[in-house]
Image (spheres, rainbow, N blue to C red):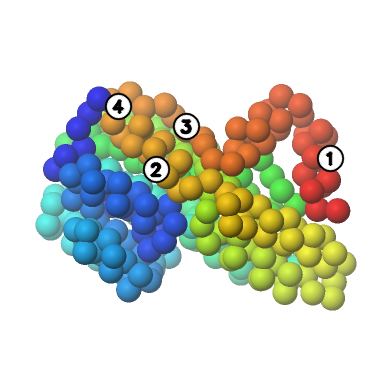
Amino acid sequence: MSSLKNKVALVTGASSGMGKDFAKALLNEGMTVYAAARRVEQMDDIKQLGAIPIKMDVTNDDQVQAAVKQIETDQGGVDVLINNAGFGLYGSVEDTTIDDARYQFEVNLFGMARLTQLLVPSMRNKNAGTIVNISSMGGKIYTPLGAWYHATKHAVEGWSDCLRLELQQFGINVVIIEPGIIQTEFGDVVGGPMTERSKGGPYEPMAQSVANATADSYKEGGGSSPQVVTDLLLKALKTDSPKTRYHGGKYAGMMMFIRKYFGDRAFDKMVLSTVK
C-alpha cells in the first residue's frame, strides 16, 4: 500500500457531492489538496479543514492556466489529478441545441482534457503520478433522452484508455471510476431543463416520465453515499498497480452487467420499461 501523506492533489468539481467528499478524504490522508470549482464560496468548509480553494471553471482556459501556474509555483505540480467536474445534460437529440450539446462536451470532456494536458509535463518529469477520471456507469450504458450526456461519458472512457497507453511509459497511472446513482445534485440538474426543453413537443411525455424516474432514483435514500466512490478512489490511489477501472454505487454493477451480457435489445426493453 502506498502512502499519500505529503503528496499533492488537485480535485475539480470540489464544491459539492463527490468532489467535496474526495477532498475531505485526501486531506485526512495527509495530502496537500487544491480544491477547484466555479462556486468557490461553497468550499469554505473544506478550506477550514486545510484545502486550498481555487476558483476554476474548466471551460475557462485563462482560469485553468492560472490554477496550474499557481500549483506549479507553489508545489512544482501535482502527484494526483482527479478530474471530477461535470454535469448531466438531458433532452431529446431533436430538442437539444447544438450549442448546448457542445457545452456538455466542453465541461465533461474538453475541460478535463485541457487541464490534464497542462499538468502531465510535471508528472512526466517526475516519472510518477496518477490521473483519475470520474466517468459514470453512463459511459458503458445508455438511457432515454441522455444522448449528449452519455456521448461525453463514452468519450471519457475511450480518451482515458488512450491516455493510459501513452503515459504508462512515464510511470503515470490513468484510472477511470464509474459511479452508479450517487446522492448528489445530478438528479436536480437533469430534470427541470429536460422537461422545459421538451415542453409542448413530441418528446414531452417521455421527458416527464424520465424526469419522474430520475427523481425517484435520487430521492432521499435512493442513491448511494458519495463515500462508496471515495472508497474506490482511495483504493486506486493506495496501490502502485491500480485497476484501469473501478465501478460502484447503486445500479452500476447490475446495469453494466445486463448491457454487456444480455445485449442491446434486452437492455432497450429494460430501460424503456422504467419510463412508461
**Disc nearer the start of the sequence (4/1):** 4
**Disc nearer the start of the sequence (4/2):** 2
Q: Position of residue 156 (x, y in %)?
A: 51, 44
Above or below 195: residue 12: above
Above or below 193: residue 223: above
Q: Which residue is drawn at the image coordinates 70% and 67% (left, top)?
A: 194
Q: Secondary structure at mark 1?
A: helix
**Disc nearer the start of the sequence (2/3):** 2
Q: Which residue is drawn at the image coordinates 58% and 52% (left, top)?
A: 221
> What residue is disc 2 on?
230
**Disc nearer the start of the sequence (3/4):** 4
Q: Secondary structure at mark 3?
A: strand
* Residue count near mark 4 (Cα–Cα under 10 Å), binned few <14, some 14–19, many ≥20: few
Label 3, label 1: how far apart the Cα atoms are? 27 Å
Q: Where residue 239 is drawn, which disc sits there?
A: 4
* Residue count near mark 3 (Cα–Cα under 10 Å), binned few <14, some 14–19, many ≥20: some
Q: Taking the image as drawn, is residue 139 in sight?
A: no
The quadrant of the picture occupied by the N terminus is top left
* Residue count near mark 1 (Cα–Cα under 10 Å), binned few <14, some 14–19, many ≥20: few
Q: Secondary structure at mark 4?
A: loop
Label 3, label 4: how far apart the Cα atoms are? 13 Å
Q: Where residue 245 is drawn, which disc sits there?
A: 3
* Residue count near mark 2 (Cα–Cα under 10 Å), binned few <14, some 14–19, many ≥20: many
**Disc nearer the start of the sequence (3/1):** 3
Q: Secondary structure at mark 2?
A: helix
The residue closer to the viewer here, 148 or 167, is 148
